[in-house]
């Protein structure tokens, strides 16, 4: 049982490290601009939580920003993370990869919860795995 907790802890810490490195690289090599929240997209997902096997509505913010592509200004729409809380019309900074602005972006003020959960769970599982619950 202890080995499973240690493995889970290591997996969560690797996920945390991967997320942090990705954010650092996009901040270092990406371009900073401002994005505006224009709407929300709703998705219905199956809720697999124990005792609650229904459907859950998940909201994703839709943001737009301008970027330069070979000297031509283009508008792009991106779908934010479901844990990001925005108001319609809100402006927020976004770092984007100029080679893949739709696929690689980072919202520094809104995209923070998951990486800290990875870190907390990683440390917690490692602690309990090493110390034997």
Image: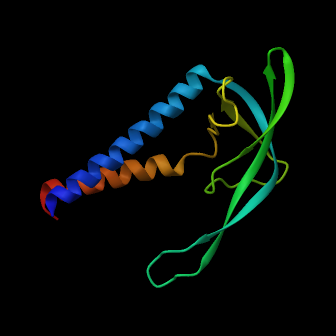
Residue 107 position by quadrant:
top right
Where residue 17 appears, as percent x and y from the top left, is: 39, 37
Q: Nearer the viewer, residue 30 or 48?
A: 48
Relative vertical location of residue 34 with respect to residue 130 in this rendering, above or below: above
Where residue 58 appears, as percent x and y from the top left, is: 66, 65
Horizontal side of residue 115 vs 101, given as left or right? left
Farthest bottom residue in view: 51
Horizontal side of residue 103 vs 115, given as left or right? right
Number of numbered discs overlaid on the protein picture: 0
Q: Nearer the viewer, residue 34 or 3?
A: 3
Where residue 52 appears, as percent x and y from the top left, is: 51, 83
Residue 83 position by quadrant:
bottom right
Where residue 11 appears, as percent x and y from the top left, is: 32, 48
Relative vertical location of residue 69 with respect to residue 21 in this rendering, above or below: above
Which residue corresponds to the image point at 70% horizontal and 36% vertical from the top-left?
A: 102
Which residue corresponds to the image point at 77% horizontal and 33% vertical from the top-left?
A: 34
Which residue corresponds to the image point at 84% horizontal and 14% vertical from the top-left?
A: 71
Position of the N terminus by quadrant: bottom left
Relative vertical location of residue 59 with respect to residue 27 in this rendering, above or below: below
Horizontal side of residue 53 vs 34, given as left or right? left
Which residue corresponds to the image point at 80% horizontal and 35% vertical from the top-left?
A: 65
């Amino acid at each position: 049982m202890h080995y499973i907790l240690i493995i889970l802890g290591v997996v969560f810490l690797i996920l945390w490290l991967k997320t942090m490195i990705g954010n650092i690289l996009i901040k270092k090599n990406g371009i900073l601009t401002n994005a505006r929240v224009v709407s929300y997209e709703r998705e219905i997902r199956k809720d697999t939580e124990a005792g609650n096997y229904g459907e859950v509505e998940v909201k994703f913010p839709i943001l737009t920003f301008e970027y330069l592509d070979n000297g031509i200004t283009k508008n792009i729409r991106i779908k934010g993370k479901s844990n990001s809380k925005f108001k319609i019309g809100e402006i927020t900074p976004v770092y984007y990869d100029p080679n893949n602005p739709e696929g690689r972006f980072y919202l520094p003020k809104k995209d923070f919860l998951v990486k800290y959960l990875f870190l907390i769970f990683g440390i917690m599982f490692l602690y309990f795995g090493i110390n034997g619950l």
